[in-house]
Amino acid sequence: MLGSSLLNTTLLATDSGDTAQAITSDGIELIRIGCTVRAIEQSEDLITLTCHVYQKTDSGGDLLNIAQVVNPVCDSELLQLGQQVLNPAPNRFMRARYAQGFDGEKYAIRIFVAGVELCNVVRTCEVHFAEGESATASLYLREPCGAIDIYQYYNRQIVIYAQTDKYLYPIFSGVIDMPKIDYSGRLRILNATKDRSKSVEKLSIDTIHGIGYWAASIFGEEQNYETKNAQLTDRLSTIPASFDFDATEQAHLTSWLPKPVADWTLSDCNVYEANMALEMSSAVSIVNRIEVELHHQFDRLIHREISFSYRYLSFMSDFDYIIRVAAEGPAPKLADVQSAANGGGWTTGEWWVKGTPPPGVYNGVIWKAADYKYDYEPTGEKDENGHDIVNVVQIPIGSDSNLYALAASWKAMRRWKQAIDEKYIIVLQNQESIAIHGEKKEKVTYSINHESDDDKMAKNWGSEKHYKRPKGVKQLNGDYTTNIDNVIPGEFANGYRVAVQIGYTRMLESHRQNSITMDCKFLPFASLTHTVHVATQRFNANVKIAAYSHSWDFTSKRGKTTLTGKFFMNPGSRTQTFSEVEPPCERPQLPCETFQQEFILNDYIVPYGVDVIV
């Protein structure tokens, strides 16, 4: 991308119009370019030739020889080259002694707006790059420079290069978004921006997914993001790194931690020490202890069963019932027993019933079970209110031993959902920082919520119309439970990790406010991805470039770069890699209330004359 090659009077293409159909060997030189080609990606076309080619002409050599990969588009155009061709720099060179990276050669700052170079109208120019921000440029026009239509620059592409005969450095590309006139200061200013958010939107979603950590329970559903930039911001909050675009619009993810080996060194010869400032972190803004309160919320499905058994008057045998039924009365009807069992609101099942003895002769006693209807028999007496006193009598109307339940057993089932909120407290702290500054803490709260309605089994839990066998893990109290805590597979572990990473990154960010700002010679190769070793009498350390500004004064022919480097403040932050994933805490054992799991029902004799309220 930064390479260059010379193209001197090279035959680009031939065309003889209508005669091209017949002549196959003689080529006519269409255009000859005598200039230096610098290989820079640019959207403008070098040359577009619109014609019809009916027969291939073999010239016996290369159509075009450029030391880089060029993908020609051959549709309606004969040849399309996506590159920028710069003429030799005009005689407006900047002073080489105030720059580094040009091997001592003078250099020129080339400024193009909409493809047209601004030659002599710019007095000063500034370009600024910073982590997480859009790159900006400001052009201050000369006074007097004649009448200029400011509107002609609105929304126009601007490109800035630093050039010598050997080197070509892209410095800035963007769009002029805010021309400005300062009448009091007699200034006309063109402000340009390279919109970072628009550059992010051009990235593939796979690129966004490859950055940082993410969990739906922490940040919300992915489809709720309106822009890729919003998702990128959330993901960057989980890692100590910056995501930026360089002057060639290439994206870079760079750790905040300075590299152990610097990309380049600044010495006393390159730094203007008179303009060097060191700023330490504010003790107020430091965070060295973070408490992460994590709530894990889900529904617990509970299946509870209770066993019931019943034997009428404790009769042990059929004959025992036969000889005593006349005195004790018949056993309750099966329908009555089932109605009473289902009347408690629980669903019953697994019924076992023993009816009365079948018709037959038992030890000389003829037996036949009969169904009865109830009637009233007057006694001829009246109560104190004058009402007739009657006796209730049973009248046999048929025989069926299965009408009655001499003994029965069944299970009553109930299912319901129990809302669970597991609470975890995760503490992250920097002991070295606490020893220096005391404890400076923050607390953050996150919730991992599982919607049980999205689970097939839980959706209709508790609305069963018929008895269902137990599902789940049997607890010590006899209940069967199922935790609906994995609606999104692995979401608890993932959400736990993201919550920890956010706290970890926040703590590191507060310890990264130490910065050194210095004016240097013009450094055209500076990048936000670089680590610089500053080796001066006043400061000697590796710093990661967090911001830089280029500025040029075209009157004095001087250029400079203002660097801002950041570094961590204590050994507790000097890890060489991103944080290790904290394992989730051990899940708690949820308590289960005890209950009586089995009931043996007995007969209850109502004394004569006692009212029974049902």
Image: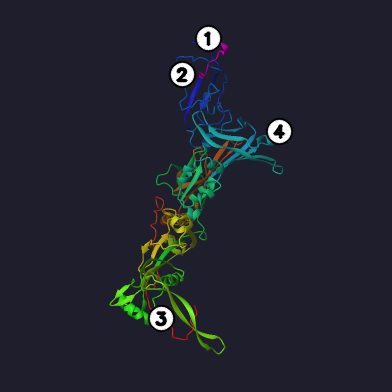
Q: Earlier in the sequence, mark 4 or mark 1?
A: 1
The residue wearing badge 3 is 604
Q: Residues within 10 Å of mark 2 (few under 14, many from 20)?
A: few
- Of the pair 403 and 483, the residue shown nearer to us: 403
Q: In the structure shown, which secondary structural element does the residue marked by tag 2 occupy?
A: loop
Q: Could you tell me the amino acid type at mark 3?
A: Tyr
The residue wearing badge 2 is 62
Q: Earlier in the sequence, mark 4 or mark 3?
A: 4
**From mark 3 to mark 2, how far is it between C-alphas?**
112 Å
Q: Is residue 439 above or below residue 406?
A: above
Q: In the structure shown, which secondary structural element does the residue marked by tag 4 occupy?
A: loop
Q: Which residues are magenta?
A: 9-21
Query: Residue at left 32%, top 76%?
Result: 366
Q: Could you tell me the amino acid type at mark 1?
A: Ala
Q: Which mark is residue 66?
A: none
| Residue farthest left in this picture | 363
Q: Nearer the viewer, mark 4 or mark 1?
A: 1
Query: Residue at left 57%, top 88%?
Result: 386
Q: Nearer the viewer, mark 2 or mark 1?
A: 1
Q: Could you tell me the amino acid type at mark 4?
A: Gly
Q: Which mark is residue 146?
A: 4
Residue 150 occupies which quadrant of the picture? top right
Q: Nearer the viewer, mark 4 or mark 3?
A: 3
The residue wearing badge 1 is 22
Q: Nearer the viewer, mark 3 or mark 2?
A: 3
**From mark 4 to mark 2, how far is it between C-alphas?**
48 Å
Left or right placement of residue 469 versus residue 193 in this view: left
Q: Is residue 209 above or below residue 583?
A: above
In contact (CB < 8 Å): disc 3 and disc 2 = no
Q: Residues within 10 Å of mark 4 (few under 14, many from 20)?
A: few
Q: Is residue 524 magenta?
A: no
